[in-house]
């Protein structure tokens, strides 16, 4: 099976950097994804790590270490609009169309 | 504009009634998915379809049914056998970048 753990809530100030961690226990997976979801809205894709290392997309970066069963999402130059929930998800190795999501981290950005 | 539409946004039903949630996409994506989200929780996979006329159960398929007669459409029926149907239901699709899922706006179903 697949199990992903994230902190339930993180608070940071505007302009700061915040890291949202995701630790997992899996029976094998292809890659780690990150999604953003504003309250009541649809999740939107942020990034995907198929390989170990850092992927950078503008203010957002994502990191994966398979040996440590760990990944994180790094948000830089925080803006108020970044206040949302962030989910990590793994893609199952046995069936690459199955995705398992963590329970999400609610990020509160304060002025 | 290409995207995924779900209707209705809010749905209210009495216990014991079946209800069908609509999901349509014009992204020309082969794969489509249904997820359920409960308050403060992540997304749980109900059903997925990789191609027309084929679909597979996810982890919480009991009490749900789907069909995939057209590439663009993947309706979900919540049957009276689903014990706790009240939830936020999200439909998604993926294309060539099959790791990237595009989500619809969701349907919030309340059953009383």
Image (tube, coloured by chain):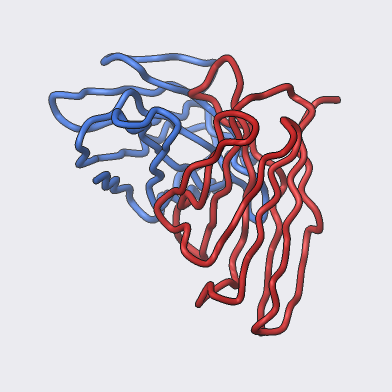
Describe residue A104's horizontal placement relative to residue A35 as left or right: left
Where residue B94 sits: x, y (%)? 59, 27
Q: Is residue B73 above or below residue B109?
A: above
Q: Is residue A93 above or below residue B83?
A: above
Describe residue A20's horizontal placement relative to residue B94 as left or right: left
**Residue drawn at 13 percent across, 24 percent down:** A67
- The residue most toward the right is B1
**Residue drawn at 46 percent across, 52 percent down:** B44
Q: Colour of chain B?
A: red
Describe residue B28's horizontal placement relative to residue A63 as left or right: right
Q: Colour of chain A?
A: blue
**Residue drawn at 61 percent across, 70 percent down:** B79
Q: Dividing the picture into quarters, in which one does residue A2 lie?
A: top left
Where residue A1 sits: x, y (%)? 24, 46
**Residue drawn at 19 percent across, 37 percent down:** A27
Q: Dividing the picture into quarters, in which one does residue B101 lie?
A: top right
Q: Is residue B100 above or below residue B8?
A: above
Where residue A42 sits: x, y (%)? 65, 45
- B25 and A50: which one is in front? B25
């Amino acid at each position: 099976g697949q199990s992903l753990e994230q902190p339930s809530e993180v608070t940071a100030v505007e302009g700061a950097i915040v890291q949202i961690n995701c630790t997992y226990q899996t029976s094998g997976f292809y890659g780690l994804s990150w999604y953003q979801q504003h309250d009541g809205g649809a999740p939107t894709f942020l990034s995907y790590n198929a390989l170990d290392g850092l992927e950078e997309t503008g203010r957002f970066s994502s990191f994966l270490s398979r040996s440590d069963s760990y990944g994180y999402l790094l948000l830089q130059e925080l803006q108020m609009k970044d206040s949302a929930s962030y989910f990590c998800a793994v893609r199952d190795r046995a069936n690459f169309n199955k995705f398992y999501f963590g329970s999400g981290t609610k990020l509160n950005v304060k002025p | 504009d290409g995207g995924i539409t779900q209707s209705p946004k809010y749905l209210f039903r009495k216990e014991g009634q079946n209800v069908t949630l609509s999901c349509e996409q014009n992204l020309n994506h082969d794969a489509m998915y249904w997820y359920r989200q409960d308050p403060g929780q992540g997304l749980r996979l109900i059903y997925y379809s990789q191609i027309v006329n084929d679909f597979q159960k996810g982890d919480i398929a009991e009490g749900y049914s789907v069909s995939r007669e057209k590439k663009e459409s993947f309706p979900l029926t919540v049957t009276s056998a689903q014990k706790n149907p009240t939830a936020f239901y999200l439909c998604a699709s993926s294309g060539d970048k099959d790791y990237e899922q595009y989500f619809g706006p969701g349907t919030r179903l309340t059953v009383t």
